[in-house]
């Protein structure tokens, strides 16, 4: 029997919903059959485990009318792997049932937005029949398992990282038949055979890690206290934000490339709540090293520790990061070792971590190529001269190649024959997609934003829709200060849940009120330092006034090669504030910057085709769209 501690007298409401769901069946299965445009609150919670969130388009809310209900559907794609059949299906579904776009998540999956309840079953069924799944992409269980999006065939550690991301995902996939009963009428489509060692590990009890008498041997009837996130990477490669995961495994090989074991990190997490000091972002701790044959039992021991001792009363306190923080690493390890049945060895030496985005052309190591394509804010769409969605469809249809999605919501196209390189590049360029990573503005290349408004119910303010113009303004400010080529990792979220991981950024924007953001500073370019909150509520209209003294201080006092985030962490917030309070901006010609004390107004409208032309011209001149339009209008009015 599992050694479950005595349950608390009163658990959160969601714990009861999970327990009564009959392993994720009800009330979802019943409500799917009715003609309502939306699900009940209880069904919404169970729907998440199947990979979907119920949302409403907040742009379309009208007082006295029903909300514009729609579903967001998320794929389960271990390591970001998307086969060509699945991509073409998702492209079609986005047009047939969605909002004509796809959104790459920061956990290497795709999201389809805008699906109506009546079309949800057809959408999920099509995904499953084309080598995909949405099971476990949301909910209180293991989410999508991440791995570096680099398909090197001649570097065994990268091959192993992808392999074990898939195996860990299989191990922790819900075993309930609910998914196939509800969405495929009981038909169980097998997209890939599980490894025998994974099947065996799921049933191996160890020291109380599984339930022998339940449909869910690892999760039981109540699943996890909260979401649980895993990753697998290789020494030195921090393309998956290793320190933000509940559990991270680092592949350790010998000189011949043979797998020996794994270094293990645990206890990371980004989500928090404004004005709730008991909630916080946290970096993962070093746990130790285990031999390769022990990886599944060690993972089950960690899962069982969180499952049995995680907080099921206060959901804000339910992530594993709080258990580690409350207990400390030693107590946590001791409990894990009880379930594991062995002692965890000390961590093996590792090189310094470095963020990699793998953009541009690379050799796979087997004669073929791969290409990393930057996708601003992860939105695959056709808009004006930028037609990434059309380009990807043509490329995948023509060459039948797979892709890997990245943790920075970009795309890696791979298995490309050298003779196809010129044609693929031509398709992308003709559709307005930048292929050369050196031609991408550094602020854009390393930025991320969550979707936020209008669909996310948690959003306090804008994120994805606002970040492009904010980056334009920051770029214009840096250019004015003679820092135009500066690369700063900027991440933005519309609420404190941290889906774009802003708490590891050099400059993080976290929505705190309409048109206002909490500002976080002090992260590092390689995401190895946790940022800290610098101001609680900065009106976005004050962006330039707020950032200028920080950038000037950085420019004048930085050490050689020092990044903005590391500089902020080194000098400290007290020094940053003191410099800002005493800062006197140098006089500037009115034409070259927005005059002090004047606000930007937004009541002038322009046609789409003019907007697109302004956007292209502003990018070519390396100025903000606001400045370009302002200069043009000043010249026009002066000539009247």
Image (tube, rainbow, N blue to C red):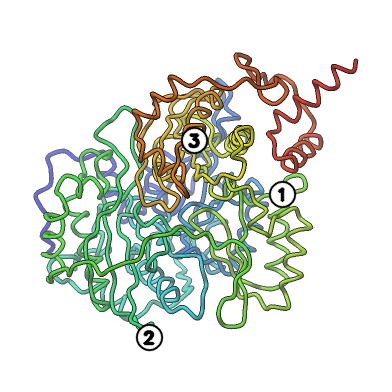
* Residues marked 3 and 2 touching at CB (< 8 Å): no
Q: Looking at the picture, how far across and down is residue 430, in whole percent?
A: 79, 57
Left/right of residue 612 with respect to residue 258 in the rendered view = right
Disc with the residue nearer the chain's start (1 vs 2): 2
Q: Looking at the picture, how far across and down is residue 163, in whole percent?
A: 41, 74
Q: Residue at x 35, y 31 (%)?
A: 573
Element assignment for label 3:
helix
Q: Between residues 459 and 623, which one lies in front from this camera angle?
A: 623
In the displayed structure, 512 sits above or below 153; it is: above
In the displayed structure, 331 sits above or below 501; it is: below
The residue beneath circle 2 is: 256
Quadrant for the N terminus in the image: bottom left
Q: Residue at x 13, y 71 (%)?
A: 342
Q: Between residues 44 and 476, which one lies in front from this camera angle?
A: 476
Q: Residue at x 51, y 79 (%)?
A: 153
The residue beneath circle 3 is: 556
Give the label, 3 or 2, closer to the camera.
Answer: 3
Left/right of residue 639 with respect to residue 167 in the rendered view = right
Q: Mark 3 and mark 1: span between their CA atoms?
A: 42 Å
Q: Looking at the picture, how far across and down is residue 475, in whole percent?
A: 61, 37
Q: Residue at x 28, y 53 (%)?
A: 284
Q: Mark 3 and mark 2: span between their CA atoms?
A: 48 Å
* Residue 297 location, quadrant: bottom left
Q: Looking at the picture, how far across and down is residue 88, in whole percent?
A: 64, 63
In the displayed structure, 533 sits above or below 319; it is: above
Q: Between residues 115 and 272, which one lies in front from this camera angle?
A: 272
Element assignment for label 2:
loop
The residue beneath circle 1 is: 382
Q: Residue furthest right?
A: 640
* Residue 129 location, quadrant: bottom right
Disc with the residue nearer the chain's start (3 vs 2): 2
């Amino acid at each position: 029997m599992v050694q479950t501690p005595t349950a608390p007298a009163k658990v959160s409401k969601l714990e009861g919903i999970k327990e009564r769901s009959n392993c994720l069946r009800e009330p979802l299965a019943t409500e799917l059959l009715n003609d309502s445009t939306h699900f009940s609150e209880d069904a919404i919670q169970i729907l998440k485990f199947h990979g979907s969130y119920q949302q409403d388009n907040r742009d379309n809310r009208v007082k006295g009318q029903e909300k514009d209900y729609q579903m967001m559907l998320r794929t389960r794609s271990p390591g970001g792997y998307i086969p060509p059949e699945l991509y073409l299906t998702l492209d079609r579904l986005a047009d047939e049932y969605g909002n004509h776009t796809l959104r790459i998540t920061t956990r290497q999956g795709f999201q389809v937005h805008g699906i109506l309840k009546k079309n949800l079953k057809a959408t999920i069924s099509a995904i499953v029949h084309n080598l995909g799944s949405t099971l476990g992409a949301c909910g209180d269980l293991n989410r999508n398992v991440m791995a570096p999006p680099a398909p090197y065939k001649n570097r065994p550690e990268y091959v192993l990282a992808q392999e074990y991301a898939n195996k860990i995902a299989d191990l922790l996939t819900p075993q309930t038949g609910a998914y196939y009963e509800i969405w495929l009428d009981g038909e169980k489509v097998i997209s890939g055979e599980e490894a025998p060692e994974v099947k065996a590990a799921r049933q191996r009890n160890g020291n109380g890690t599984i339930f022998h008498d339940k449909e869910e041997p690892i999760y039981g009837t109540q699943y996890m206290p909260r979401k649980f996130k895993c990753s697998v990477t290789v020494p030195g490669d921090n393309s998956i934000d290793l320190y933000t995961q509940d559990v991270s495994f680092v592949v350790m090989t010998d000189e011949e490339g043979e797998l020996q074991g794994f270094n293990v990190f645990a206890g990371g997490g980004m989500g928090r709540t404004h004005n709730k000091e008991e909630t916080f972002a946290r970096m993962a701790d070093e746990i130790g090293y285990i031999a390769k044959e022990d990886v599944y039992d060690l993972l089950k021991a960690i899962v069982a520790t969180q499952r049995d001792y995680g907080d099921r009363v206060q959901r804000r306190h339910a992530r594993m990061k709080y258990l580690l923080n409350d207990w400390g690493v030693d107590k946590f390890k001791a409990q894990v070792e009880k379930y594991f049945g062995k002692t965890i060895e000390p961590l093996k030496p590792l090189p310094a971590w470095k963020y990699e985005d793998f953009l541009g052309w690379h050799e796979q190591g087997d004669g073929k190529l791969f290409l990393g394509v930057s996708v601003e804010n992860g939105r695959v769409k056709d808009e004006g001269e930028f037609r990434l969605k059309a380009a990807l469809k043509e490329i995948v249809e023509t060459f039948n190649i797979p892709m890997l999605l990245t943790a920075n919501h970009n795309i890696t196209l791979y298995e490309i024959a050298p003779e196809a390189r010129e044609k693929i590049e031509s398709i992308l360029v003709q559709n307005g997609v930048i292929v050369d990573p050196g031609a991408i503005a550094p602020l854009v290349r390393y930025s991320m934003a969550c979707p936020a408004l209008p669909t996310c119910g948690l959003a306090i303010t804008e994120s994805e829709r606002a970040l492009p113009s904010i980056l334009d303004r920051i770029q214009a400010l840096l250019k004015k200060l003679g820092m135009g080529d500066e690369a700063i990792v900027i991440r933005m979220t519309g609420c404190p849940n941290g889906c774009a991981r802003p708490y590891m950024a050099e400059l993080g924007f976290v929505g705190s009120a309409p048109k206002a953001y909490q500002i976080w500073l002090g992260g590092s370019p390689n995401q190895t330092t946790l940022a800290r909150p610098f101001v609680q509520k900065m009106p976005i209209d004050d962006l330039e006034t707020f950032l200028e003294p920080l950038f000037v201080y950085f420019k004048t006092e930085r050490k050689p090669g020092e990044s903005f985030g590391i500089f902020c962490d080194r000098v400290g917030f007290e020094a940053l504030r003191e410099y800002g309070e005493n800062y006197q901006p140098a006089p500037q010609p009115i034409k070259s910057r927005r005059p002090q004390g004047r606000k930007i107004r937004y009541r002038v409208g322009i046609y789409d085709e003019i907007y697109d032309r302004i956007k292209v011209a502003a990018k070519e001149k390396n100025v903000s769209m606001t400045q370009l339009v302002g200069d043009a209008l000043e010249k026009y009015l002066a000539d009247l």
